[in-house]
Every structure is written in structure tokens, then in C-alpha cells.
Image (cartoon, grey):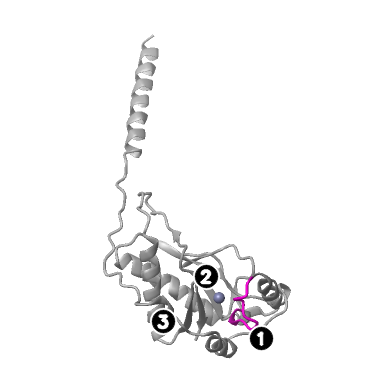
Amino acid sequence: MRIKKYLKLLLIFLVVLLGILYLRSNKEKPMKMNNPHNVKGVVSYKRSFNDLNEEQLAAAKRWGIRPIESREDAKHLGKKLVEIKTCEAYKVDSLTHSIPYLVPRAAKLLKEIGENFQDSLSHKGINPNQIIVTSVLRTQGDQKRLRRGNRNATENSAHAYATTFDISHKRFQKLEDPKGYPTEDANPVHLKMVLSEVLRDLKKAKKCLVKYELKQGCFHITVQ
Ligand SMILES: [Zn+2]
């Protein structure tokens, strides 16, 4: 009888203990708010990022591969190409008209843009977000398919040389807090402004050429 009583008490004790632990774990964590400061952007997207196709093509031909016919051909280029995968620095969108490969020089630039963007956000009091890569290397086949639907896809695109990629200026990937704190969504206008500051600085440092694409919602960037 006594043992039963002790067991009953022990059981009650355990239930109470588990209840307390459960309540504690669910205690609401305060939301991390944005506190944007020193976000200046550029005066004009169009005027600040107006490196035309001819200039981008010249850089692409200098640093890039010879255009390839098919996706199969990319596999035979070995170390000339680096595969671009979602990582800490950036997210790769589901690509429909391109394949995720860049020459090492361009891959390094993309990583630098992604890292600088996140550093800038944290310095400027904005919750963490990643850039999204929307287009990378286009084979001649991709280029043909794209031309059917889009007049803007120029005959001779820098995307054919694995030196050029597009980064969305409309969509960004929100990063969740590693400790599980809820975070306030960042204002997309602020994110676009910070990204443009990062690109302006890299352009000034002669690391890249940038064209602002309004319709496609992206920055078209070639390594320099
Ligand atoms: Zn592009």
C-alpha cells in the first residue's frame, strides 16, 4: 500500500514538473523588430546601374567560357565552371531558362555580394535576409527558348559566358533567427536600397558591371 502511495505522489510530481517545463518552453519570446538606420540607397536605379549589353559582353568574353550548346556540354568543362548552390550567402531560385554554373571569378563575386548584403543589413538594423539568384548560365538552347517569350533576351547575351547572373530586386529570402526568436519582416524597399548600395560599391571598385532591369525585376551583373 505504501509503495503505491509513493508511486502516486511521484507520478503527480512528474506531471507537475513536466507541466512547468512545458509552460516555460512556450513562454513567448519577444519579437526582434527592425530598426533601420543609415539606409540611403542610390539616387536613381536606372542611372546608377546602366552598364549596357555591349560593355557587359566585352567583359563576359574576356573572363568567360566559350558559349555552349547544351546542358550536357557544361559537364565537360571541369574546373572552368563552379556549381552555384543555395548557401549562407545566397539562395538560388528554381531556374527554368538557365543552369547554375559560373566561372570561379563570377562565383566569387556572387558570394561577395551576398555576404556584403547580409553584413550591411546587420549594420543597418535590418533583420537577416538573403539575395535570390534568378538566372545564371544560359546555353544556346536556353537562349533560343527564352527569345521566343521575351524580346528583351538579346541575341548575344552575357549569360552565355558563365560570367553573368541576375539577382532579384523584388524578392528576398528571409532568414529565421537561429534561436527561434520571431522576427519582424523587413521592408522590401529597404532591402532593395541596401542591395543597391552594395552593388554601387562593388561597381566603383571595378569588380562588376550592373544593369538595372525594371521589367525582369532584377539586377543583371557581369564580373569585371
Ligand atoms: Zn540577366
Whole-Å distance between the Cαs marked 1 and 2? 28 Å
Q: Earlier in the sequence, mark 2 or mark 3?
A: 3
- Magenta-colored stretch includes residue 153: yes
- Residue bearing the label numbered 3: 47
Q: Residue at x 40, y 68 (%)?
A: 192
Q: Badge 1, how many Cα within 10 Å: few under 14, some, many 20+?
A: few
- Residue bearing the label numbered 1: 66
Q: Classify residue 147 by image quadrant.
A: bottom right
Q: Main secondary structure of the magenta part?
A: loop
Amino acid carrying label 3: it is Arg
- Residue 150, compared with residue 79, is above or below; it is above
Give the magenta range. Answer: 150-159
Residue 107 point in image, percent of width and height: 53, 76
Considering depth in this image, is 209 or 115 the residue closer to the camera? Answer: 209
Residue 112 point in image, percent of width and height: 44, 75
Most extreme residue toward the top is 1
- Magenta-colored stretch includes residue 8: no
Residue 38 point in image, percent of width and height: 27, 70
Amino acid carrying label 1: it is Arg
